[in-house]
């Protein structure tokens, strides 16, 4: 019996809901606190920065929501050289003001650990903490993985908890060498071969991944 929850493709009018889903847990994380130490400004700054990337994803990638908007998956198509949002430097400076150097440093750390080969990048994955979180996460991850798999390209993401690492492993992702974010958070790069489409299968480590990298 299929217990998957309905999933829909996100549109421009869904941006505010996606941003809220992502910013909520991010603002309460150690990384969010390191990026914006002032708790009074943190949510507003993170909202402005995350919105830049969600808008960019809808122009240069895809995003999916559970039908009740309780979970979101935001993908970037990395088919060639990585492109930041239009006028990213100027817009980022306006969005984060005094904290610009921290955001740029985080960008550099993540970029240093991300694959250079063509792939689809799951940039944000957020699920509300309401009941059945794992079921919701699994439904959205399976549906969006299937969509990305149509391109016959690998998929990549980073997670910052062992629970999320194990969830992704059940969907065919392989964990690579973890690294630390500037705040000390351990981050697990995850890579999935396009051939591995069934949750629960244990994949071999892909030879093409070039490294020895936000979801919530």
Image (spheres, helix red, strand yellow):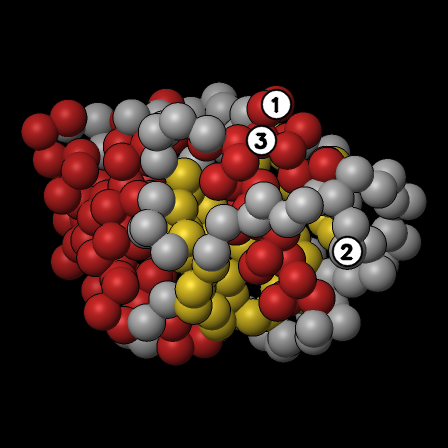
Residue 164's disc number: 3
* 15 up-or-down from 164: above or below: below
10 Å crowding of disc 3: few (<14), some (14-19), many (20+): some
**Displayed quadrant of residue 190:** top right
Cβ–Cβ under 8 Å for marks 2 and 3: no
Q: CA distance from mark 1 to mark 3?
A: 5 Å
Disc tally is 3
Cβ–Cβ under 8 Å for marks 1 and 3: yes
**Displayed quadrant of residue 28:** top left
10 Å crowding of disc 2: few (<14), some (14-19), many (20+): some
Depth order, front residue of 107/1:
1
* 112 up-or-down from 161: above or below: below
Q: Image point 37% across, 56% down: which residue?
A: 67
Residue 117 appears anywhere in the view: no
Give the mark nearest the N terminus, 2 or 3.
3
Residue 97 appears left or right of 50: left
Q: Image point 64% across, 33% down: which residue?
A: 167
The image position of residue 136, as x and y in percent, is 48, 40
Residue 24 appears left or right of 45: right
* 188 up-or-down from 12: above or below: above
Camera-nearest label, 1 or 2? 2
Depth order, front residue of 208/170:
170
Which residue has dot 2 on it?
A: 197
Q: Image point 58% across, 44% down: which residue?
A: 3
Which residue has dot 1 on it?
A: 162
SS at mark 3 in the image: helix
Q: CA distance from mark 2 to mark 3?
A: 18 Å
């Amino acid at each position: 019996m299929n217990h998957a929850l309905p999933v829909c493709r996100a549109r421009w009018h869904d941006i505010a809901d996606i941003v809220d889903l992502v910013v909520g847990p991010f603002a309460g994380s150690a990384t969010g606190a390191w990026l914006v130490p002032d708790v009074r400004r943190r949510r507003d700054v993170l909202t402005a920065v995350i919105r830049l990337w969600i808008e960019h994803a809808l122009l240069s990638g895809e995003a999916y929501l559970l039908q009740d908007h309780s979970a979101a998956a935001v993908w970037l198509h990395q088919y060639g050289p990585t492109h930041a949002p239009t006028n990213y430097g100027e817009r980022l400076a306006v969005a984060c003001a005094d904290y610009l150097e921290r955001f740029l440093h985080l960008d550099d750390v993540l970029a240093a650990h991300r694959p250079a080969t063509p792939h689809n990048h799951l940039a944000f994955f957020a699920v509300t903490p309401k009941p059945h979180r794992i079921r919701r996460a699994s439904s959205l991850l399976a549906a969006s993985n299937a969509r990305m798999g149509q391109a016959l390209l690998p998929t990549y993401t980073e997670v910052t908890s062992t629970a999320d690492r194990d969830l992704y492993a059940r969907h065919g992702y392989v964990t690579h060498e973890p690294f630390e974010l500037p705040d000390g958070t351990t981050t697990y790069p995850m890579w999935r071969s396009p051939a591995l489409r069934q949750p629960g299968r244990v994949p071999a480590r892909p030879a093409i991944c070039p490294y020895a990298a936000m979801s919530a």
